[in-house]
Amino acid sequence: MKQMVHYALVLLILGGTAGVGLYGVNNLTSERIAEAMKRNLTEGQKQLFPAAASFDGPLSFPLSSDSGTYYKVLGADNTVIGYELDGAVQGYQSKVRVLTGVTTNGVITGIKVLEQAETPGLGAEVQAVPSTRTLWSALAGLFSEAEKESAAALLPPFQTQFAGKDLGGLAVVKQKDPAKIEAISGATITSEAVTRAVREPLEAFLAWNGK
Amino acid sequence: MTTQLKELTKGLWEQNPIFVIALGLCPTLAVTTSVRNAIGMGVSTIFVLVLSNVLISAVRTIVPDKIRIPCYIVIIAFLVTVVDLVLAAYFPDISKAIGLFIKLIVVNCIILGRAEAFAAKNNPWRSMLDGIGMGIGFLIALLMVSGIREVLGANKLFGYVVFPGWRPIGVMVLAPGAFLTLGLLLGWKRLSELKH
């Protein structure tokens, strides 16, 4: 009995210390983490609508039993040139959050995965940008400035598939099909999740906005 | 001095956590699709392993034997969460690259294995040396497996094409390729020991 109390006390003290420590660390870091996320969102917004002058939002629209978040994209003369929807669904092992840009006609201008923590090498490949350079030219590039690659201009191929499609094209297939979304091999669940995070808010939004 | 040096170097090859102790095979199979992923996982693990070894060794005399495992898990989970939050707040670029791996470390059995087999019986200084050595050994093993898999499976190294025009063996980037590579490397290591 005395031993049991001793064990319980040790666990209590250890757990309590860890809890208080995490509370402190969380307090110190949460603000900066929120800022970094916000920067990421702002970058994504500009990337999907490079012509936009400003964004109005976050605004909300009805999405199934809950509500979804969207932004109005305003052009130079303050007219609405499109919308951006912020959608999230459960992926293979994490929440997958996607920003979708859509024109007033319902055509997708592009998507950006804002958050995901899927398996590295499989699901996480939705954000991968493959290089077309060879190892040898990259090694040579270390010695000559001319071989620099403009990495910033490259977008993940999985995500660029969405540009130019509308609701009808948002289905995941395993074979090459330019009219649909081709899944990443070994990561069908994540591919489906990204597509659903685009389709579900878009469907609800178009139905609500068009009425 | 020589025994201390031994604590540091034994994990590199002689008692390599993957090839000899065969711990942490799950993350090894999962992240060795590319060398970049391997480096991300290896570096994050070294970091958490060294910290957890030192902390666990420091509390080894006050933690009762019967409840040591839950205590170790609390300490490891605490460390992993702190590292995750601090990286996300102060080093967002690094966090983007290796944040995925940090969360996987909680379940990496090398950390718990070293806590149980070494840190619980040795002082913090020696435990730190053990952590550094085992961590680097883990990274070395990851680099070997991922180097082979990335070249054969994707015809790439560090994301760059190696042999222009050659069509890679796709199965090497999937799970069977990981088992094959790891099995052959393990066998090769044992064979080289048998000859001596």
Image (cartoon, coloured by chain):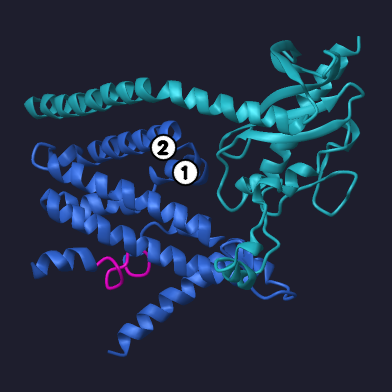
Dominant SS in magenta: loop
Query: Mark 1: few, some, or many residues within 10 Å (few <14, many ≥20)?
Result: few
**Up/down of B153 relative to A179, above or below:** below
Amino acid residing under circle 1: Ile
- Counting from the top left corner in percent of width and height, residue A158 is at 74, 46
Amino acid residing under circle 2: Leu
Q: Is residue A102 magenta?
A: no
Element on which disc 1 rests: helix
Element on which disc 2 rests: helix
- N-terminal of the pair, mark 1 or mark 2, is 2
Residue linked to disc 1: B94
Q: Is residue B11 magenta?
A: yes
- Counting from the top left corner in percent of width and height, residue A81 is at 86, 20
Estimate the spatial distance between the alpha carbons at disc 1 and disc 2, rounded to whole Å: 7 Å
- Counting from the top left corner in percent of width and height, residue B11 is at 27, 65
**Up/down of B37 relative to A16, above or below:** below
Chain that is cyan in the image: A
A150 lies left or right of B134: right
Let me know if residue B121 appears in the view.
no
B19 lies left or right of A45: left
Determine contact: label 1, label 2, CB under 8 Å. Answer: yes
Quarter-wise, where is residue B180 in the image?
bottom right
Q: Residue at x 26, y 28 (%)?
A: A18
Quadrant including the N terminus of chain B: bottom left
Specify the segment rendered in magenta: B10-20
Chain that is blue in the image: B
Quarter-wise, where is residue B22 in the image?
bottom left
Let me know if residue A183 appears in the view.
yes
Q: Residue B87 shows which numbered tag?
A: 2
